[in-house]
Image: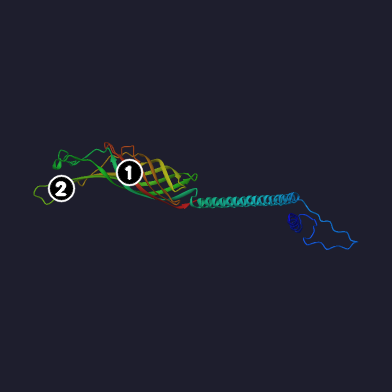
């Protein structure tokens, strides 16, 4: 019985090409002719068959491992090639964007820009002497017992020409020629017995100047915002003081000098921002008044080269 099982196993191995042996059929052999020799039956031991199977399996596993390694190597090379191609495409795209940005910056920000500027805000005269209400013709008279009024803030306006020199993408220099008007005012009311209305006492100061602001501008946040600092140099051209409809003439100082700082939004061809300036020079003799202003300004640059 054991011999038959081994023979069947050998038959399967022969078909698979593992071994090449011959064996006897299970049925009884036909008695041969006397002159022919009986075939010899070959039996292979089980241990030898097991060794052949293990060797064959090991060979197939080694071949499979070799093929897997070759596939891995090819895949690694393909991934590396694809990665290199993607990086090259990214670099080309970035370079194209940088060139386009430089081209846009060149178009939006020429080296020199020319335009106009307008401002609107509040102004006052810091430290200004209180204005006496008594008429100049009768300085001893104090109407309604009020001797003087202390000035408060008023409206300031201005306009002029502007130029900007773009030194780099981050730094530029702005130069302007502005005609500015500083104003300050004060008023008080007095009740009048047995009258429908009281009396109003009012004082005003108005100063006209021609100033040349020179400011360094620093752009940040991808040129979206800017900060500026510099000075305004100019002269006082006209001034008046009005007290209860009586005009008075201030003795103006011809020179004006104001440090200035500001911040705003930069759109390339326009600036929108706020600025503060303070005149360190007394605007008129015996006034003790130093004009200052807080303004909102718009600067347009329609021309550039």
Q: Nearer the viewer, residue 179 or 278?
A: 278
- Tell me which corner region of the image, top left, top right, bottom left or bottom right, holds residue 283: top left
192 w.r.t. 7: above or below: above
In this figure, what is the number of numbered marks?
2
Q: Mark yes or no: residue 292 visible.
A: yes
Q: Mark yes or no: residue 204 visible.
A: no
Which quarter of the rendering shows the N terminus? bottom right
Q: Classify 10 Å Cα crowding around label 2: few (below 14), some (14-19), many (20 and above).
A: few
Q: Residue at x 46, y 53 (%)?
A: 303
Name the residue carrying label 1: 293
| SS label for mark 2 | strand
2 or 1: tag closer to the N-terminus: 2
Q: Give coordinates of residue 188: x percent, y percent.
A: 19, 45
Q: Give coordinates of residue 144: x percent, y percent.
A: 13, 42
Q: Residue at x 48, y 48 (%)?
A: 112
Name the residue carrying label 2: 199
Q: Nearer the viewer, residue 139 or 10?
A: 10
In the shown orientation, is residue 194 left or right of residue 302?
A: left
Q: Give coordinates of residue 219: x percent, y percent.
A: 45, 45
Foreground disc of the pair 2, 1: 1
| SS label for mark 1 | strand
In the shown orientation, is residue 70 left or right of residue 178?
A: right
């Amino acid at each position: 019985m054991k011999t038959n099982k081994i023979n069947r196993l050998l038959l399967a191995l022969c078909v698979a090409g593992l071994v090449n042996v011959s064996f006897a059929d299970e049925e009884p052999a036909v008695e041969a002719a006397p002159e022919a020799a009986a075939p010899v039956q070959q039996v292979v031991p089980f241990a030898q068959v097991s060794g052949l199977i293990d060797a064959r399996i090991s060979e197939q596993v080694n071949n499979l491992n070799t093929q897997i390694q070759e596939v891995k190597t090819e895949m690694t090379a393909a991934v590396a090639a694809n990665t290199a191609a993607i990086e090259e495409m990214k670099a080309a795209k970035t370079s194209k964007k940088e060139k386009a940005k430089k081209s846009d910056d060149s178009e939006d920000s020429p080296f020199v820009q020319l335009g106009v500027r307008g401002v609107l805000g509040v102004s006052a005269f810091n430290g200004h002497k209180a204005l006496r209400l008594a008429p100049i013709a009768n300085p001893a008279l104090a109407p309604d017992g009020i001797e003087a009024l202390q000035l408060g803030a008023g409206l300031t306006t201005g306009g002029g020409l502007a130029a900007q020199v773009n030194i780099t993408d981050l730094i530029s220099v702005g130069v302007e020629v502005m005609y500015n008007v500083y104003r300050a005012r004060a008023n008080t009311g007095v009740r009048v017995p047995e009258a429908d209305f009281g009396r109003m006492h009012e004082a005003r100061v108005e100063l006209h100047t021609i100033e040349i602001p020179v400011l360094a501008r620093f752009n940040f946040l991808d040129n979206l915002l800017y900060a500026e600092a510099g000075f305004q140099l100019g002269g006082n051209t006209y001034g008046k003081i009005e007290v209860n409809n009586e005009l008075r003439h201030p003795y103006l100082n011809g020179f004006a000098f104001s440090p200035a700082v500001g911040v705003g939004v930069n759109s390339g061809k326009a600036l929108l921002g706020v600025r503060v300036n303070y005149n360190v020079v007394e605007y008129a003799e015996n006034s003790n008044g130093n004009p200052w202003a807080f303004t909102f300004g718009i600067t347009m640059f329609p021309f550039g080269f």
